[in-house]
Amino acid sequence: MNNATDFLVATRAALAQASQLAVAYSFSIIGALILLFIGWTIAGLLRRWSHEGLLKVHGIDETLAQFFSNVIRYVVLILVVVMVLGQFGVQTASMIAALGAAGLAIGLALQGTLQNIAAGIMLLVLRPFRVGEYIETGSVTGTVRDIGLFATELKTADGLYRLAPNSVLWNTPVTNYSREPQRRHEISVKIGYDDDIEATEATLREIAAAEPRVQQTPAPKTYVAEFGDGKVAVTLRYWIETSEWWATSRAMTKAAKLAFDKKADVMAETQSGGPQDDAA
């Protein structure tokens, strides 16, 4: 009987204490819920507005706009959580210090990853290359397929997939073969000291004039590049549209070979007396 009485007394005391706590913290709980709702709404609105605003800035990539807008949202949510905890008497100053220490520890542990993120942001802002452009670095070569915050995806000339960390691309010189609208190409032929330099230059200019993909501004030029070892190097320098560079340069090289082969055959026939010698 005494045990039952003690149990009832303890239960009543617990219920009374719980009701007192509920009354004491009811306003805090309601305020916390209101803060969470308002903070969540504001964080979403700020994320959307910042994303739309960043996309209107020249040079800001979709990935970069998404990253910064998410950062703004999470910062607002963290502040809201700290304010909510403050409603229940939690020492927010010590919590902020603990979060700072945890952030520092995480930053040190993920130092390499953070370097890639920082490099990715710089690549997206400064744009040394864009999707679809062909680039070359000391160790990476290929067509850019995607630029992320951590790494860049490329496709090599032989069709292979390559993933390059952004820190590698940012810390080395990058040659962009697709950025400029025109590219230069040169064809150099070697002739003997007794051969006609003017005729050789004229033949090279005729080859350039016969190819419609060769740009006339700036105009193709020929010059004597060097001489030595019994040979004189005559060079044709001309410009091509970047998108046509590979096909045009190969076609011009072939055309030069055929033209000088034909010229050599004509000279051989002339020196031997012409085709009539065969009939004789």
Image: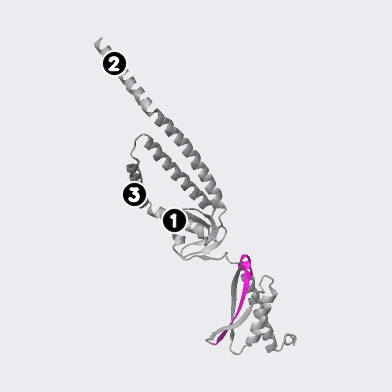
Vertical side of 89 occupied by 240: above or below: below
Element under disc 1 = helix
Q: Position of residue 112 (x, y in %)?
A: 39, 55
The part of the image, by quadrant, that contains residue 252 is bottom right
Identify the mark at residue 105; answer none if there is no mark.
3
Q: CA distance from mark 3 to mark 1?
A: 18 Å
* 240 inside magenta stretch: yes
Marks 2 and 3, the one that precedes in the sequence: 2
Q: Position of residue 49 (x, y in %)?
A: 54, 46
Q: Which residue is mark 1?
A: 118
Q: Is residue 267 left or right of residue 166?
A: right
Q: Nearer the viewer, residue 135 or 3?
A: 3
The part of the image, by quadrant, that contains residue 196 is bottom right
Q: Nearer the viewer, residue 216 or 243?
A: 216
* Amino acid type for the residue under numbered disc 1: Ala
Does any portion of residue 256 appear in the rendered image? yes
Q: Position of residue 115 (x, y in %)?
A: 41, 56
Q: CA distance from mark 2 to mark 3?
A: 51 Å
Q: Which residues are magenta?
A: 230-248
Q: Are marks 1 and 2 in contact (CB under 8 Å)?
A: no
* 252 inside magenta stretch: no
* Amino acid type for the residue under numbered disc 3: Ala
Element under disc 3 = helix
* Amino acid type for the residue under numbered disc 2: Val
Q: Residue furthest left?
A: 2
Q: Are marks 2 and 3 in contact (CB under 8 Å)?
A: no
Identify the mark at residue 9; answer none if there is no mark.
2
Residue that appears at 63% across and 79% down: 221
Q: Is disc 2 surrounded by few (<14), some (14 to 19) or many (20+) residues within 10 Å?
A: few
Q: Position of residue 102 (x, y in %)?
A: 34, 46
Q: Is residue 272 left or right of residue 35?
A: right
Q: Nearer the viewer, residue 263 or 18?
A: 18
